[in-house]
Image (tube, rainbow, N blue to C red):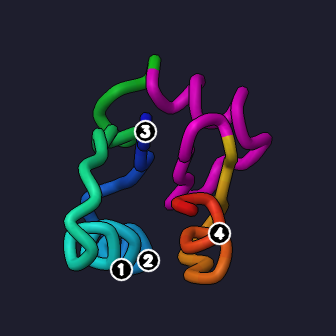
Amino acid sequence: MAISVYTTPTCTYCRLVKDWLKQRNVRFDEYDVARDPRRADEMVRKSGQMGVPVTDINGRIIVGFNQGALEAALR
């Protein structure tokens, strides 16, 4: 399962997504879009959103901390 989380260092909801995944022992790649413009462009292309967090779970895009959507995508 390929999981990417697009974040920024000061984003509270980004921390919630990462903590939620870690509590469930789900491995993910984290990309800091504040420091990596290539990843920021990738995030916008995938989601159409400029805000974080954006989580990509096997191509399913979840914007924000949406626990129900995260659970469904991980099934």
Q: Which residue is most to the top? A: 38
Secondary element at tag 3: loop
Q: Nearer the viewer, residue 4 or 32?
A: 4
Tell me the CA gap for discs 1 and 2: 5 Å
The residue tagged 3 is 1
Q: Identify which residue is drawn at 57% across, 62% down.
A: 75
Question: SS of the residue at dot 2?
Answer: helix
Among the 4 quarters of the image, the one containing residue 9: bottom left
Residue 72: x %, y % from top left: 65, 69
Residue at the image position 33 percent from the left and 38 percent from the top? 31
- Residue position marked by numbered label 4 in the rendering: 72
Circle nearer the N terminus (3, 2): 3
Compute the Cα span from label 1 to label 4. 17 Å
In the rendered structure, find residue 13 and report the number of the disc placed on it: 2
Say which amino acid is labelled 2: Tyr
Left or right for 16, reference 61:
left
The span shown in magenta is 39-59
Q: Alpha-carbon neighbours of circle 4 within 10 Å: few (<14), some, or many (≥20)?
A: few
